[in-house]
Structures are given as structure tokens and as C-alpha cells.
Image (cartoon, coloured by chain):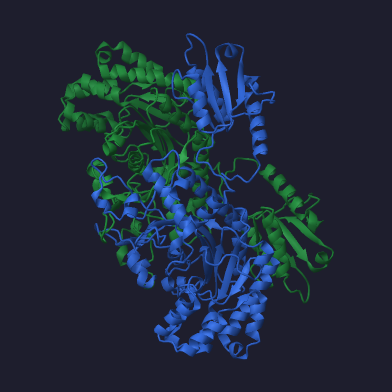
Chain colours: A green, B blue
Amino acid sequence: MQALFRHPSLPLRATRLFSSHITTARTRPTFAPQLPSPHRLYSDNRGVVQTLDDEMGKDKDDKKGGNFNLKVPKGTRDWDGDDSALRDSIFSKATEVFKRHGAINLDTPVFELREILAGKYGEDSKLIYDLADQGGELCSLRYDLTVPLARYLAMNPSIQTFRRYQIAKVYRRDQPAMTKGRMREFYQCDIDIAGTYDPMIPDAEILRIVNEVFEGLGWEKYTIKINHRKILDGIFKVAGVPEPLIRSISSAVDKLDKLPWEEVKKEMIEKGLEEKVADTIGEYVKYKGQGDVLELIKNDEKLYACEDIKAGVQDMELLFTYLKAFDSMDRISFDLSLARGLDYYTGVIYEVVTEGSAPPKNAAKGSEAAVGVGSVAAGGRYDGLVGMFSGKPIPCVGISFGVDRIISVVKSQKKVKAKAKDIDVFVMAMGGKGFDGMLPERMQVARKLWDAGLKTEFSYKVKPKFQAQFKAADTAKIPLAVILGEDEHKEGKVKIKKLGNRDENDPEKDGVMVRYEDMVEEIKKRLKDLADDMGGLKIN
Amino acid sequence: MQALFRHPSLPLRATRLFSSHITTARTRPTFAPQLPSPHRLYSDNRGVVQTLDDEMGKDKDDKKGGNFNLKVPKGTRDWDGDDSALRDSIFSKATEVFKRHGAINLDTPVFELREILAGKYGEDSKLIYDLADQGGELCSLRYDLTVPLARYLAMNPSIQTFRRYQIAKVYRRDQPAMTKGRMREFYQCDIDIAGTYDPMIPDAEILRIVNEVFEGLGWEKYTIKINHRKILDGIFKVAGVPEPLIRSISSAVDKLDKLPWEEVKKEMIEKGLEEKVADTIGEYVKYKGQGDVLELIKNDEKLYACEDIKAGVQDMELLFTYLKAFDSMDRISFDLSLARGLDYYTGVIYEVVTEGSAPPKNAAKGSEAAVGVGSVAAGGRYDGLVGMFSGKPIPCVGISFGVDRIISVVKSQKKVKAKAKDIDVFVMAMGGKGFDGMLPERMQVARKLWDAGLKTEFSYKVKPKFQAQFKAADTAKIPLAVILGEDEHKEGKVKIKKLGNRDENDPEKDGVMVRYEDMVEEIKKRLKDLADDMGGLKIN
């Protein structure tokens, strides 16, 4: 399977980096164990990159390249080649959507004071990377982008409303493993809306943003699973779960997307729940749909007598009204089994799932398009976090997009192409005996093309062979050549030729001579024609 | 002076962050002490951000906000607001130029194995941030982007030619201080060309890229100071500097842009140089110009007898030929006093300097437009670094742009505007008695505008007051309003109104009614008119 993805121009090690990344993403349909973060991103979502050494199970510290251990640290990777270009194109699509919604970019330091992170991640605090104590403040690498946002808001009390996005790497000292899909350094791409507003309006806008990001990437198949913490916790209470067990039982329910009910039930009983309580929960968390689920709850006297559930239902009714106004209901699956891991969440919670092939758009309504494939985005409302820093709570709602998983899906769709290098024109020269290579002339032409904004290269040889120039342009799949000849140059002319042109009937098969002053315009015209011919969605 | 830069919407702490940044950049004309990196970036170039605590000389660890020490770690900052938008616009301009020249993006991990960084930075290795030993590999935060590039090339031996850019933060445990202009976390923006090519061609392209980046930012005043290590070291040899003193004397010469000759001479003598040797050096390093400096060297029998100098002169003659072909000679000042700190450099070295006001472009020819203002970019050729990892050298040449200093200069020019938030349209509603706020209708309109790619906001209140909506749009300087009214809505119409319109004669002074189906087109037309009216250079 890995050979399918082998990148021709990279050595074995690099090839394995890419291919294992994809392989894992496509073969690991399950969710990872709970990671408590508001936008806890699913450890199977980070893109797995293992070096050959990991695959072999060798102790990498023993392997030396020359005098050095020539590798990146465990659980990290270099982003290069087409992967890097694809990642950039996804970032730029997301950024475009975020800006359209008035979000501004916040960039926080990669490390925070250790005490800022302390007590925010429960038992997973052991996964935090600490900086060495070299004198001065004790610091740690950020674990997510949400705690830094809360720290920023608390530090700047005059900012009472804030719509921010941040695309940056976060750090977790998880055991990286291909089979578990965990990286230690991975990207998060977050948007959050902070501030006290009329209920559910920002929540609805976050879900609208989800639509725009995925539709911007050309996705047709994805489902937004949604639930409300007040409803879920209310169900636990009504079913008879003792208060101290609620979060722990919630975390068992969260596994229903990858474990059969019997196993989840077993875990609940092991955690101390009576069997009949577990069975009651089992009945409720089966509910999936949209407004019909709300009706079911409202018609259940026991449930609707619970004040928390009533409040949650009111929120959800309002949310659905707003989502209809935003034309954003199609993707919604109100799913009472969605729990998510973190204590932070105080209101609506959601996860976006997708798969390679799914029922058509209409069939996805109320049903699940993509159970078991893994979430590509996740988030919810967390109204208490800022208050942990400043004592003055600022309600927040947000989402985190899982960049690595999205990249895997985009790659498997093969719809979106992003080339690491995307040169428009190769400037070459040819001549007979005594030919000097025309390097300064090629440079002058390249400069003119750069000035016109055209992506241009030429051979770095003083006297390149003509065939070598052609081969270089061909290998790099450059669409056009500008060919200089000594005689033509004297006449103020140059030849433009389409490369890789297999059309025998094309009148320009052998290229076309143009005057220097018309060169830029003639090239732009041909590039436009070529782009129109290619069609398809290309982001770069 | 700081009050001048006070940002109205930020609290005191944040305000000081911005203002001290700018103040320092504009009032610190000197270069920082040597930092040995191939693109050693001038510690005064990193944008100084000190918290109020630093300024007051207080021990920050004593200051607590609530239960937390509410601050970012020493020497780091949050990038927010217009600063963040301006930074993004500079990154995107640089990226556009880099891609035009066929460079691909490489993103390396923020930390490397400690042994990769060891022995690369001389005595400044003490400034490296180490990660704590939490079991497993020992790692350190990257100190620059050049050593990671060399590690990458050594790890991927099939890559023999590589043109890459990288824009990322690097980490140095310097003592951050406003007066010295040092940050501990700061951006580098690098482009490097690796590979064995005919001499001086990639070197010339790097300098052409410098032109395109700064001209892309609308800069008219900057000078590229250039020298050649072989010529400089040759001069030292000819003057009689003992071999072991050469690097140390070179570092003294590097201070000539901020110290008078007498002090540099004193330092040389203290370092063990004879006075007459120092005086000989003093004669040579005065030379500044372009081809005329090459002539001076060639006509100096003693100098030109030195093989190193001869080789350096040949390189420079070739470089000047290529720079002429690239139309890139105007900014060049061949300056024999340019030394740069690092041992790495093996060929051409350069630094870009600028100032707030300088002689016109022609006057800059061969002269110095901007002595003493500080470099905004720096780099050179380093042919040995990759070989330190792999044993197989790959020659490299590159440059690093100083993002913080560039931002300061751009801000002082006030030519380029980048707004953190740049909303096109505010959707509002008004009505009489019993008015319900029309929230779903406002949402529907917003959704239509988002679908059309328009940056749109609306009030998050169910029943907002009309004046409050106007005020919100006005505060955010949003140019257009779409105004919904109950009667108009029933007729399928909506009002478009230019905000902040002071033109009493404008026929659209009170807005214009349009049908819903024409709304997007009518808005786009008006936005285009407004953009045309504004004119000027706007990057976002």
C-alpha cells in the first residue's frame, strides 16, 4: 500500500514519512482515547509520521548518520514538498473563511509560563513538554491554543469581545506510534468567539464557518455531530448516575462511536454504575436526528422535568432556528451519544466526521454519513476557562480543525492539487558553434518575467546543453518555455513554446516567435488558455 | 513619545507592548553585538517588546494577576491587532516573491536533537533553549533556520539542489532589553539556494529577490552592502594580521558602522595587532563603491598578488555582470568594511540597510543611503555547513529578512495599511413598534453575502437598537451597511448605504433600495468604487 504513495523524487526515508502518514490516516478509523482540551483533537487526527526506525522497532538513539544522529526528534516531522504546499493551501482557505467572518489572527508564544498551563489538562498534564530550568522563569510548550487564548483574554481585560483565529503547532509528549496516530508536534487551526452575547448566535456562526471551510475545500460528504452538555448530563442525572460519576460515565459514552454498546456498558458497570442505570442511558443515547430528537425529549416527561435538560433543549431549538437561517442544517446530526472528553464544555459540543464515500447529501440528513472515520474538527462552548485566570468569566465558543486528517482526506480525494513548486516559464537558450550560453540574456528575460509576476526559472549553467534545459523544464512540469537564439535575439525576437504539447495539429506545435515587447502579454495569454483547459479545482 | 503610539482599544500593558516596540526600533540606530549565525540577525532587529515590569526593573515573578502570573514569558510577545495583520501581509509579500523564484516551503520542527545544534554557534550556544529531560531524547529549541536546513539536506542525500523558504520563529535566551532590542522568540524569514552550480548565479538571484521583496513593500530607500570573505580575509593577510587573529579582527571591523575608526583601531590593538597593521587595514576598509572598488584592488599590486583576493575579485566581477543583467546594481554598495560575524561564510556576504529618509535613488548609487540605521536583511554564502552533518558538502547561499525591523520601518512609512479586521458589510435592521429585531432575516442576508465571499458582520443581539448597530459599524470603520426593514423585506427589497458618507451631494446619501437578487452585485459595485477612491497601496 505504501508504494502507492511513493514520491518519486524523495529518498526512502522521506517516502516512508509521507506514506506512513497516509496509510495510518486511512486505516485507523477509531477515535483516540480522551485528551482533555476544549478542542481536544483526537490523537488519531494528527497525521502519523514515523521514521523507518520506528517501524523497525529499533532504538533510534543508536543510529548515527556520520558523527550526528541525523533525524528529527521523536514524534516530529519536516513538512516539505507537495505535503507542505497542500497544508499551505488548506491554511489559506481556512484563513479566508475566518477573515470573512471578521476574525483576527492572534499569534501567541510557543511556550507559556508553566503555571499558566498547570491544572488545565487533568491527568494529561504529564504530556506537557517543559523547558529546562536554565535560570529565570519556568516555562512549558503550549499544549493547545485554547489556554493561551484564555490567558490572553485574561491579560487584556479591556477586550470583552474577541473573534480570533490561530493556526499553529502544539506539543504533547504522547507516545508517538503509527498504530495510534499520534504526533508530538502537530498543527491546530482554531477559531473562537469570546464575549457575552444573546444565546446561541455565535454558536450558530461557528457551525456556519465549518460549512464554509469544508465546502471551500470542495467536500461534499461530512456530518456535524452535535449535542449539548446540559442535555447529556441531565440524562445521566435522570437515569440515576451519581453526581461524582458523571464525567467518568460521560467519557465512557464518548467511546460509542468506536466500541459496541456491550463494551461501553461493561466499562460503566466497572466504573460503579448499576446495570439498570446503564441500560437507561443506553436507551437515550441511541437517539440521533435533528428536530425530531428535540421532540422526543420534550415528550419524555421524566427527561423534560429536568431543568438542565429543559435549558439545553431551549438552546438547541434556538440554535436550529439560526442554523436554518444560515442554511446550515443539512449536515447536522443531533446525536445524544456525543460526549467529548473535557470538563470545560458547558453548552453545545460538536465533532465533524467524514469518510471517503458516503450517501448523497440528502441521505445524510439526520443520518450519519461517516460514523467511525474519525473527526476532522471538534469543539464546543466553554464558558468558564477565562475566569480560571482572571476571576471574570468570558463565555467562549470555538472549534479546532484537524489539519493532518483534513490533509489525508484531501489527498485521498485527489480533487485538490497543490504543487510545492509551480513554475510558469523556463527561460532557455540554444545556439550553434561558438555559442556562449547567453546567460546574461536569459537573466534579462527572467527579470522581465519576474517583474510581470510570472514564476520563472532558468538553468544555473553558463553554457547549458539545449536538451538538458528541456529535460529540466519537463521534469518540473513547467508549461511554457521562452527560447533565446542568437539570431532571433539580434532581431529583438524570442520563441514561446508550450512544453509537453502532444497535439500534432496545434499551429504552435513548434513554438511561436514574438517580439520582446510583446513577450509578457503573449505568455500570460497562453498561461490563461492552459489554465482554462486544465479546469478543475486548483488551490495554491 | 510612547503616547504617540498608544492604541486606543488596548489596555496599558498591551499598549506598552506596541509602543516600546516602535520606540526602540526608531531610536536604536546601532548594530547589536555579533551573533554567530549564517544570517545572524542583529539582535536590535527583532522588535523589542518589554512588559511594563521590565521597564520598571521589577522582578516580574512577584506580580500576580488573580491566582496566576498573568504574563507571557520574558522576551516573548503576543502578536495581535494591526501588528499581526501587518506581519501577515509582509509574510505574504515575501512568500509571493519566493514562489515566483521557484522556492518551496520547508517547515521543520521547533525543536531539534540537542546534538544537531551543538557546536554550531560558538560561545552563543549558551543562548540555546533546552527542553527539560523528561526521559527520551535531549532536545533544544531551534536557534535559527539555517542549521535545520542543513540537517534536512544531510538527512535527504538524494536532494542535491534545493531552493527553499521558511518563515518561522527562532529562540535565543538572550537577556531581553529594550535598549538592546533583543527578543527571545522572534521571526526569521529565510530563503536559501543549495546546490553546486556555475559560480555566482544563485548569489545574484538571491540579491534580485532582495530587490523584489523590498520593492514589493513599496520601499524606495535601501542599500545592499556587499563584500566577499576571500577579499576581506586576503586584505587582513596582506596587511599582516596573524592567521589566528583573522576572525577576531574581522569582528572588530564589523563594528565600523557604529563605532568611529579610532575605537575599532583601539580594539584591534588590544586584540594584539601592531598599530601599523591596523592602520593598513584602516586604509583599505574605507573603500566603498561598485566596480570602482574592484579596479582599486586590481590596481593595488600588493593586494592583487594575493590568490584569495584574486579569486574574490573574479567572483565579484561575475556577480556584477549578473546583477546588471538582473537590473539589480542600483542598490549595491561594495563595502570593504562589511565583515559579518560568523565563521560559516565562505564567499559573498551582504546586509541590507535603510533609513526613514534618504537621498533619492540615483544618489544612493555607490554611496550609502542608510548607514547606522540597522540592517533589515542579511546573509551570504556558506559552503561548509551541510558537510558538517553529512560529510558531503552542499554549497549554499541565502538571506534572512528581519521581520520585526521591517515591520517597524513599514509602520513608520505609513504607506502600507493592514487592518486586523477588514469587514465589508454590516447587516442591520430597523423597525417601529413591536419590531422583533429580524435576526433570522439578518442571518439569511449575512449568509448570502458570505457565500459571495463578502466579509460580513451583524449584531449578535436578538433586538439590537438601530443606533447601536450604526455605532458598531462606524467604530469598526465598515464601509457599507445593508439595512433591513419589515415593509421593505416583504417587498423583497433591502437598503444599501455607504457609512461615514459626508458627501451631501451624493445621490445615494440616504442609501439606495435594491431587490434581494441584485444585492450582492450592487454591493460589489460600491465596494469597488470605494476601493478605487481610496487608492494607495493596501496589502492585506
To which quarter of the image does residue A234 belong?
A: top left
* Residue B47 in view in this figure: yes
Q: Is residue B9 left or right of residue A217?
A: left
- Count all numbered tags in the image, as a single digit: 0
Q: Is residue B97 above or below residue B322?
A: above
Could you tell me residue B488's position as x and y percent?
Answer: 60, 13
Residue B447 or residue B41, whichever sits in front = B41
* Residue A47 appears in view: no
Viewer-nearest residue: B277 or B163: B277
Residue depicted at 78% across the width and 72% down the height: A432
Q: Is residue B114 left or right of residue A266?
A: right
Residue situated in front as seen by the camera: A354 or B499: B499
Q: Picture coordinates of residue A3 (x, y %)?
A: 47, 53
Observer-nearest residue: A222 or B187? B187
Q: Position of residue B367 (x, y in %)?
A: 63, 70
Does residue A443 lie above or below B339 as drawn? above
Q: Position of residue B270 (x, y in %)?
A: 39, 83
